[in-house]
Amino acid sequence: MANKERLKQHLETMSQYTATPNEGMTRYSYSPEDVKTRKYMKEKMAEYGLTVREDGLGNIFGKLEGKKEFAPSVLIGSHFDSVPHGGNYDGPAGVIAGLEVAALFQEHNIKPTYPLEVIAMIEEEGSRFGGGLMGSRGINGLIGEEDFHTIRDKDGISVIEAMQEAGLDPTLPKHRDPKTMKAFLELHIEQGPILEEENISIGVVDTIVGLTQFEVTIEGKAGHAGTTPMDRRSDALITAATIVSQLPKLAKAEGNGTVITTGQFAVYPNGSNVIPDKVIFSIDLRSGEEASIQRVMEKVKALIESYQKDGIKTSIEQQLYIQPKELSKEVRSSLKESTGKLGISSIPMLSGAGHDAMVFSDYTEAGMIFIPSKDGLSHCPEEWSDLEHLAQGVDVLFETAKRLTEAE
């Protein structure tokens, strides 16, 4: 059974590594907080008997060798970056679960047939470099070397520069051969209210919604706020605000659980007495139906293009596109078998959020479980999950990992 004190220690220690103490978790990839967190995780991996390495993106792997030579690994883990002023559980709970599974393998003196690997990934949220899921996309070959050299944060710092500043080596291999992965398991907080409201301990995820993210640029003409007549203005902010206000209607009209969000909004030159000449904002579009995403995408593009007039120029750039993903039936069955064996309540679930598991699902047998989130809150300082539920999730992963590392 999972050691709750050990889980609590991991949570409390990793929660200290934030750039915004007392104002939620802010841990960007390759930041000083990232460096402190990775040092702690690597120390714990080594303590639990794992061989530790980092790849050319800074993803961390701790490997317990199996009895079968050159065999593919069962990976368990999640990400350890955060959104600005987020919570302590989104991502780290899954990494901590992986660490605890490794600790249990060590305590029970289990020598698996297939290797077990604990994985801690960078930049799932996309808070620093945009797009999201960068760690898992890099591992699975979805970021080309040329792209890797051009990715920059809002301050113009490249991934390579940020990694070097953090003492990491960007020249190391990034892409991992799918043949080295037998399965991928991820524990995550639900980030919604269903499990808590239904008093269910575990959600076994069957499908993860598809998602696409855009960066929209609206360009107008700057002018003096007091001397430019209203009928002579090309106000980028007014145009952007008008567009954004219409986006929710597109999602509601489509239905099928389609949601659309603008979470980032930058105004230039951002002076109180200057008419804005440029606005850049994000669009995040999600749905469980591929057709719904495609239809709304076209409507969004048409809407934005329709405002290209009267001195206003519009452009839209797609930063990320991932189709809805059904996770492995075999792994889902194994996770369900584990909950039954342990007497832990569970239900099948759709994930409305994107996760690293959806990237891995195209390259290996991927499975995912949710634990309840208090009041369904996430991406905020109030984000919280009960230690008992985390321990139950670990127990489910431990049983499943034992089975997967032995099964042919």
Image: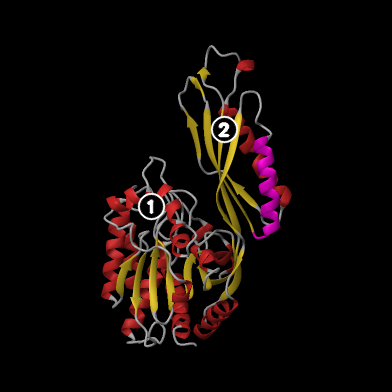
Q: Tag 1 or tag 2, which sits nearer the N-term?
A: 1
Check the picture and name the quadrant holding the N terminus.
Answer: bottom left
Numbered mark located on residue 218 in the image: 2
Q: Main secondary structure of the magenta part?
A: helix
Provide residue 392's location: percent of width, then percent of height: 45, 75
Which residue is the extreme one toward the top?
Answer: 227
Q: Secondary structure at mark 1?
A: loop
Magenta region includes residue 304:
yes
Please name the amino acid that badge 1 sits on: Met
Q: On screen, 263 above or below 396?
A: above
Of badges 2 and 1, nearer the viewer stands 2
Q: Which residues are magenta?
A: 288-305
Q: On screen, 109 above or below 198?
A: below
Numbered mark located on residue 25 in the image: 1
Residue 384 is left or right of residue 109, and the answer is: right
Q: Residues within 10 Å of mark 2 (few under 14, many from 20)?
A: many
